Amino acid sequence: MNYLLAITLFMGLAQSCRSQNNHDKSNKMDSANQKNHPVYSRTDSSKVVLKEDEWKKMLAPELYYIARQKGTERPYTSPFEQSKEVGTYYCAVCGNALFKSDTKFESGCGWPSFYEPVSKASIIYLPDNSLGMVRTEVECGRCKSHLGHVFEDGPPPTGLRYCINGVVLDFEKAKEAEKKYDDRQKKKG
Ligand SMILES: [Zn+2]
């Protein structure tokens, strides 16, 4: 790091300008990530169908690799894997509601795990016989992005384990206002 810093300083003004430009570019790429692309909506349930090159242009490289090329993130890398926050997990590509935090459990497999999706429309199931294994792939019900796999070794009541790449999840905490409203309703009843 010190070595790089020394080089940058030594190279003088021209080099500084160039690295400044690179910095600006990477900031723009970050802000274009996930939610800020045009197909993302939490209210529009119409199917999203795009060509492969359109996905590639729109999505951040890591999201494109997992969602559209059926990649797998390294285990234990997602901040969602350990998270116990209360809220809803959406598809990071299109905003479709996928899982509620109360169906999340610690599977120890290294990826965020759930036992039940929000609704039938949340998920599409496909046979996956790749890598010499018989598995069931799960895709987003709205945009058909690859999410992960479902296995039959989960907890009750479903006995299912949806093993999901954290990169394709977008989390929103349950709103404080909603909680207060629910508490009031409970007191009334
Ligand atoms: Zn989606």
Image (tube, rainbow, N blue to C red):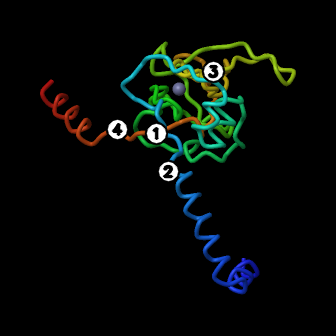
Comparing marks 4 and 2, which lies closer to the viewer? 2
Residue picked out by circle 4: 174
Contact between labelled residues 4 and 3, with CB atoms less than 8 Å apart: no
- Say which residue appears at 41% left-offset and 30% top-offset: 41
Q: Which residue occupies the extreme left position in the image?
A: 188
Q: Earlier in the sequence, mark 2 or mark 1?
A: 2
- Residue 95, horizontal then vertical, whole percent: 46, 30
Residue 170 position within the rendered picture, expressed as x and y whole percent measured from the top left? 49, 38
The residue singled out by tag 2 in the image is: 31
Amino acid tagged 4: Ala
**In the drawing, what numbered circle is on residue 138?**
3
Q: CA distance from mark 1 to mark 4?
A: 10 Å
User: Upstream in the sequence, badge 3 or badge 4?
Assistant: 3
Could you tell me which residue is drawn at 49 percent across and 50 percent down? Answer: 31
Q: Is residue 177 above or below residue 119?
A: below
Q: Position of residue 107 (x, y in %)?
A: 63, 34
Residue position for label 1: 171
Tell me if mark 2 has few (under 14), some (14-19) or many (20+) residues whose alpha carbon lies within 10 angstroms of its own. few
SS category of the residue bearing label 3: strand
Q: Residues within 10 Å of mark 1 (few under 14, many from 20)?
A: many
Residues marked 1 and 4 touching at CB (< 8 Å): no
Classify mark 3: residues with Cα within 10 Å, few (<14), some (14-19) or many (20+).
many
Q: Rounded to the nearest whole Å, what is the CA distance between mark 1 and mark 3?
A: 18 Å
Does the residue at mark 2 contact the one at mark 1 (Cβ under 8 Å)? no
* Viewer-nearest of discs 1 and 4: 1
* Crowding near the residue tagged with mark 4, few <14, some 14–19, many ≥20 C-alpha atoms within 10 Å: some
Spatial separation of the CA atoms under disc 3 and disc 4: 25 Å
What amino acid does circle 3 point to? Val
- Give the CA distance from mark 2 to mark 1: 17 Å
Q: Earlier in the sequence, mark 1 or mark 3?
A: 3
Q: Identity of the amino acid at label 2?
A: Ser
